[in-house]
């Protein structure tokens, strides 16, 4: 495992993702522990982009339960269909929210969070967790984020 991430700050966001994704793969290769891999993935994403909050909620019964994350403390449980995370779980698709205030039922873990992207992690046709990334800037996520995070999804699913 590499000790440090290589992050070229002069790159565009899409290029940064292209530089980062193989490093996340290398960082988690050969490590069978789910918590270790989710924790390092959250840390790598936050370190690379400086997002306000990056973390995972894991499906446990009828709820999502907070998993490894980087950032301020967060809500621990989210019910199916509730908030952006619960909606992404229920719909089994990525939700990109440019302004969280405009999202009906958004769960404000922090008033500083302004925009958000949630990518479901799907294993054998079932959502097993969601990756939630929050920004303190409005409209901070676009198709580049969606594409890159969805590209990461099969790797993340393989840890479950
Ligand atoms: N805003 C999320 C809740 C999780 S926190 O942002 C970390 C939601 O509406 O599901």
Image (cartoon, helix red, strand yellow):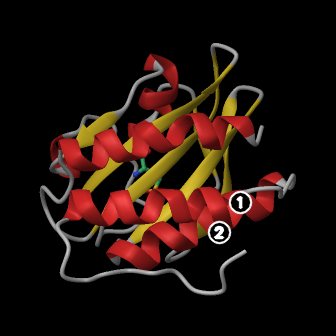
Coordinates of residue 107 in the picture (x, y in percent): 40, 49
Structural crowding at the residue carrying mark 2, measured as other residues with C-alpha within 10 Å and reported as few (<14), some (14–19) or many (≥20): some
Q: Residue at x 51, y 80 (%)?
A: 5
Left/right placement of residue 30 relative to residue 14 reads right
Q: Going by the image, does 98 lie left or right of 124?
A: left
Q: Secondary structure at mark 2?
A: helix
Residue 121 picture quarter: top right
The relative height of residue 68 versus residue 104 in the rendered view (above or below) is below
Q: Which residue is mark 2?
A: 40
Q: Residue at x 52, y 71 (%)?
A: 44
Q: Is residue 95 left or right of residue 144?
A: right
| Residue contact between numbered discs 1 and 2, judged by CB atoms under 8 Å | yes
Distance of label 1 from label 2 (alpha carbons): 8 Å
Quadrant of the image containing the C terminus: top right
Q: Which residue is label 1 attached to?
A: 28
Q: Residue 37 or 60: which is nearer the viewer?
A: 37
Regarding mark 1 in the picture, which secondary structure is present there? helix
Task: Please say if 97 is above or below 43.
Answer: above
Which quadrant of the view contains residue 47? bottom left
Q: Residue at x 31, y 39 (%)?
A: 147
**Residue 149 in sight from this viewpoint:** yes
């Amino acid at each position: 495992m590499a000790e440090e991430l290589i992050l070229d700050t002069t790159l565009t966001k899409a290029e940064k993702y292209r530089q980062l994704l193989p490093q996340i793969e290398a960082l988690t290769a050969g490590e069978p522990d789910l918590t270790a891999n989710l924790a390092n993935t959250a840390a790598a994403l936050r370190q690379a982009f400086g997002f306000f909050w990056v973390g995972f909620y894991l499906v446990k019964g009828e709820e999502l339960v907070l998993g490894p994350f980087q950032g301020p403390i967060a809500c621990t449980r989210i019910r199916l269909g509730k908030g952006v995370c619960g909606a992404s779980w229920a719909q089994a698709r990525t939700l990109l929210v440019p302004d969280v205030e405009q999202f009906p039922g958004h769960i404000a873990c922090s008033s500083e969070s302004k925009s958000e992207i949630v990518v479901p992690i799907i294993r054998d046709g079932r959502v097993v967790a969601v990756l939630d990334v929050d920004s303190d800037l409005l409209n901070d996520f676009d198709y580049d984020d969606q594409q890159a995070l969805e590209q990461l999804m099969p790797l993340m699913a393989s840890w479950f």
